[in-house]
Image (spheres, rainbow, N blue to C red):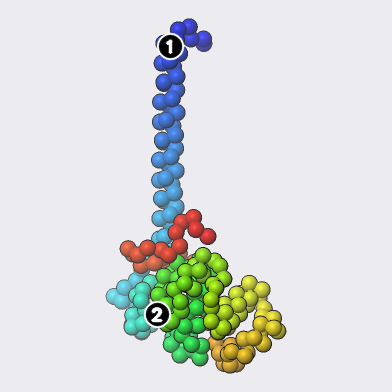
Amino acid sequence: MKLKTPIAQHICQLSCRALLSLTVGFCASTFAQEAAKEGATVQSPRFKALSLEDLNVYQQPLGQQVMKVSSIGLGGPYNPLLRSPVMGQRMFDLLYYLRWNSSVPLRLNEFAILIIGRQWRSQVEWFAHAPLAIKAGLSPEIVATLKTQKRPEKMAEDEAMVYDFVTELTQNKRVSDASFARARKIFSEQQLVDLTTITGTYVTVAMLLAMAEEGVPAGKEPPFKAGEP
């Protein structure tokens, strides 16, 4: 239908603009709500959080040990591990050795864990181990650069070796003769075995965290923001 007067045309234009504005606003609101729902789903653990009081007779011994050493309580990888307490105990014992009794110096140990945490974009691994790495003597600049997915500059010789060794092993699924020879000049055979085990074990930890959709403790800021690689 053709509008015959300028006033009628103006009224029609205003009505169309209002309708468009309402439609866009409704769509934006709906999208935001859905995005929030999706975000909440991602952040919600798939396994119910447990307290010591929730643990059965098989879980209690492991839970008591975890509470003595964990900065995140029974959260993180321990939440799913408690669902399989025998395996969880074996994993706890391995982690205990790798964290506090490994032949690899603590600074380099934590660096290797952070490299895996960054590869997997593991919120919990980074949240828990970045402060520990810095406390152990790893430069905050190295930690900050690693977080941006770049090879840190100004690394000490042993730090550069760990970065290259872990990165090559995980990305290429092998270690070249040249890289092994370089590592062997710095590390003993035991240290190379421990470093490799640290690398693989924290891939397993990252997998557990990803499978269970475990996040950082309530009220804490995730280290990797939405939209960041």
Residue furthest to the left in view is 53
Q: Quadrant of residue 69?
A: bottom left
Residue furthest to the front in view is 154
Q: Quadrant of residue 18?
A: top left
User: Hey, what amino acid is under mark 2?
Assistant: Lys
| Residue lying at 39% horizontally and 67% vertically, measured from the top left | 216
- Given residues 98 and 152, the one toward you in this image is 152
User: Image height check: is 145 above or below 62?
Assistant: above
Q: Quadrant of residue 124?
A: bottom left
Q: Secondary structure at mark 2?
A: helix
Return the mark for residue 225.
none
Q: Secondary structure at mark 1?
A: helix
| Residue lying at 44% horizontally and 49% vertically, measured from the top left | 35
Residue 81 appearing in the image: no
- Given residues 160 and 207, the one toward you in this image is 160
User: Hey, what amino acid is under mark 1?
Assistant: Ala
Residue 25: x and y in percent read: 41, 35
In terms of sequence position, does the residue under pointer 1 or pointer 2 come before the other?
A: 1
Alpha-carbon span between mark 1 and mark 2: 73 Å
Residue at image mark 1: 8
- Given residues 87 and 40, the one toward you in this image is 40
| Residue lying at 40% horizontally and 80% vertically, measured from the top left | 135
Dot 1 and dot 2 residues touching (CB under 8 Å)? no
Residue furthest to the top in view is 4
User: Image height check: is 206 above or below 68?
Assistant: above
Residue 153: x and y in percent read: 55, 73
Q: Residues within 10 Å of mark 1 (few under 14, many from 20)?
A: few
Q: Is residue 178 left or right of residue 80?
A: right
Residue 36 appearing in the image: yes
Residue 165: x and y in percent read: 61, 80
Residue at image mark 2: 135
Q: Is residue 207 left or right of residue 18?
A: right
